[in-house]
Image: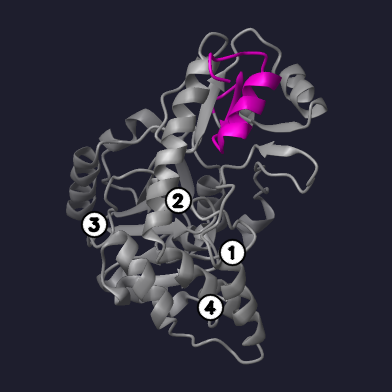
Amino acid sequence: MDRESVRDTDRVPHGGTTDRDVLDLSANTNPRSPPGTTAVYEAALAASRRYPDDGYPEFREAAASVVGCEPGQVVPTPGGLAAIRLALATAVDPGDRVAVPAPSFGEYAREVRLQGGDPEFVPSDGILDVDPTDYAVVVVCTPNNPTGALPDRGDLVALVDRCADADTRLLADEAFLGYTEQASLASHPAVVVARSLTKLYGLPGLRAGYAVATGAARDDLATARRAWNLGAPAAAVGTHCLRQHEFVRETREAVRRERHRLQEGLEPAFDVHPSAAPFLLLDCGGQDVDELLADARDQGVVLRDARTFRGLDSHVRVAVKDHAATDRALEVLDVRTDDA
């Protein structure tokens, strides 16, 4: 990390609220966690009087089964953002250029700046066409946050191949890819994949995730990773959740169903971006965004002010949760569907 750059870099706004008395549709997290999670956590907490096994063999094996790689390619991290930081810290030197999609997750540019790098913003719908030459890293988000767009995997692989030819690393943030049936980019030699348990498994406070890489990139990540960077509860719960493949299938179907219902209900009043993710981006057009957010909050629902994303000036983002949450979102946004 570049010390001078730290002093010139700000923090990034995010969704989420600590108010337990509201419906939080600002954070894109599953309202459910896999069965048995609480029991696994309690057992791991009781075992936390000793250091965890820093090799995390069971966690690595479970993560590898999700993305289709070898366990040795998995590098455990305390959350997906920690995987993103580790990937950029081992690939970006002061002055390096990094291609960053926009609008997209604001932490990419922040993490590049913390390393002393120069984030060069590329329209998120054009990031696959970027020439990776002269970039240290190209970043992609699949599906993209906050638009929900999911690039075609063939187009992604074509970009990865160009990155390999240019000796450029591709950082693939797959935080929401588990909500789709598209295969991970894990195991391609030019790629570092970042994943988390925050979204799909409904555990944002646990702070568990992982990176996946091969060759020298994997060795760099493994060396730079802090010792014991997953606590025993996070490692145990993470292992348990990553093995719950039927839970993931059920979640995908539930989100697909509710996203469709929410989109149909919102389209008469908003320009709704097509999405493969557990959220919808709404262009409010001539509506007053501050008034809309405040009115929803007064009714006990928190929406995400998407104007904090680069290039968006009239947008809010709504998380897709369960049937009741969809009904409530449509109610506070003053729109209806036939079955709402």
Q: Which mark is residue 167?
A: 3
**Spot occupied by residue 13 in the image (x, y as percentages of width and height):** 67, 42
Callout 3 secondary element: loop
Q: Residue at x 62, y 13 (%)?
A: 335
Numbered tag placed on residue 175 in the rendering:
2
Q: Nearer the viewer, mark 2 or mark 4?
A: 2
Mark 4–mark 1 distance (CA, rounded to whole Å): 14 Å
Mark 4 lies on residue? 226
Indicate the amino acid at tag 3.
Asp
Q: Residue at x 49, y 38 (%)?
A: 278
For image coordinates 51% across by 34% down, the residue present is: 279
Q: CA distance from mark 2 to mark 4?
A: 21 Å
Q: Which of 11/114 is in front?
A: 11
Q: Using the rendered image of the protein, determine whether residue 147 is visible from the camera's viewpoint.
A: no
The answer to which of 142 and 250 lies nearer the viewer is 250
- The amino acid at mark 2 is Ala
Mark positioned earlier in the residue sequence (2 or 3): 3
